[in-house]
Image (spheres, rainbow, N blue to C red):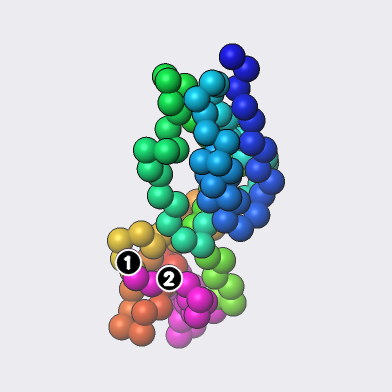
Amino acid sequence: AVPFEIEIPPGIDTLAQALEKRRVIGGQDADVDIILQPGIHRWTQPVSLAAEDAGLNAYRTRLLGVNATVSGGVVVREWSRVNGSSHVWRAEIPADADLSDLGTRMQLWRGLRRYVPARSPELYYEECSK
């Protein structure tokens, strides 16, 4: 059987919307492919997968995409050097950022490079370069 396709443009919570569509159409007669179009697909809340997200009668649900990024990340702007240091920078985390799992999930990226965040008592993260 030809897979049923759900194409998802980049945007906010588009993956959750795709899963909701997938639940509505079922999947008893063919695979269901959720195709992420190129770009950034942002999450603002956890996406939960349940039994109804799997295919029935040995059919599958597949998440496909080329040059697509699924991210729950928050853009942090307005970096400044700390006390004239050339290696330590600071920026405030946006007020709407979810800090419920601070230190567990938080990662600091600039482009494709991951940095080691250092936490201060004021809940600021400082970019620490070598």
In this view, the residue in front, 100 or 82, is 100
Let me know if residue 112 appears in the view: no
In the rendered image, the quadrant that contains the C terminus is: bottom left
Which amino acid lies under the numbered mark 1 shown in the image of this protein?
Asp
The residue located at (33%, 79%) in the rendering is 120
Task: Indicate whether 49 appears above or below 124.
Answer: above
**Residue identified by numbered label 2:** 98
Task: Indicate whether 31 appears above or below 129.
Answer: above
Magenta stretch: dominant secondary structure: loop
In this view, the residue in front, 9 or 16, is 16
Q: Residue 74's spot in the image, x, y percent?
A: 52, 65
The numbered dot on residue 125 is none
Is 59 included in the stretch rendered in magenta? Answer: no
* Region of the chain picked out in magenta, as a range: 80-101
Estimate the spatial distance between the alpha carbons at disc 1 and disc 2, rounded to whole Å.
Answer: 8 Å
In this view, the residue in front, 3 or 95, is 3
Which amino acid lies under the numbered mark 2 shown in the image of this protein?
Asp
